[in-house]
Image (cartoon, grey):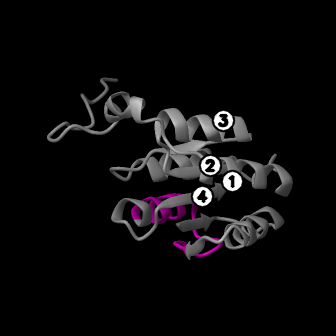
Amino acid sequence: MRIAFGTDERTAVTEALKELVAEAGHELVVAARDGDPWPDVGRAVGEAVASGTADRGVVCCWTGTGVAMAATKVPGVRAALCGDAETARGARRWNDANVLALGLRLTSAVVAGEVLAAFLGTDPDPDEGPTIARVEPRPGAGPGPAAEG
């Protein structure tokens, strides 16, 4: 499996994640340079997954929230911020998440490894397909009405 990876900050956790991807026999596709701003990291990894350059993606920033939001803006990307293995399993099983977002502030290398293994080792539940399709943008649907202020 090809795994797109990006982080806005190089840490021991991000280095461990890259090593774990390789050790599991997957190909690492670095989609963003370490230190790129988080919106660029999320977008780059999301685009790699949406284009088929990668099968799944992993994004990291201080909280994980920003990169998840940026990745999810790419059509076809379903990014999930996961802080534990069971959440990662559920994100794959019930939501067919294709990008894993991790926060660097509270995630240890051990926990990151458990989350990554669960994310990469879980398949989506085929019965969830119609429900998952409901989160995809509909053709011609815009972002919604502008807020009045």
Above or below 19: residue 118: above
Residue hosting label 1: 116
Q: Secondary structure at mark 4?
A: strand
Q: Label 4: which residue?
A: 59
Q: Residue at x 53, y 59 (%)?
A: 57
Find disc 2 in the rendering and name its residue: 119
Quick check: 118 above or below 131? below
Indicate the amino acid at tag 2: Phe
Disc 1 on helix, strand or loop? helix
Comes first in the chain, label 1 or label 4: 4
| x and y, in percent, of residue 142 in the image | 21, 38
Residue 13 lies in the magenta stretch: no
Q: Amino acid at mark 4?
A: Val
Between the C-alphas of marks 3 and 4, the distance is: 16 Å
Who comes first in sequence, dot 3 or dot 4? Answer: 4
Circles 2 and 1: CB distance less than 8 Å? yes
Q: Which residue is mark 3?
A: 87
The kind of residue tagged 1 is Leu
| Rendered location of residue 58, percent (x, y) | 59, 58
Tags 4 and 2 touching, CB below 8 Å: no
The quarter of the image holding the C terminus is top left
Q: Label 2, label 3: how many angstroms apart (C-alpha)?
A: 9 Å
Labels 3 & 4 near each other (Cβ < 8 A):
no
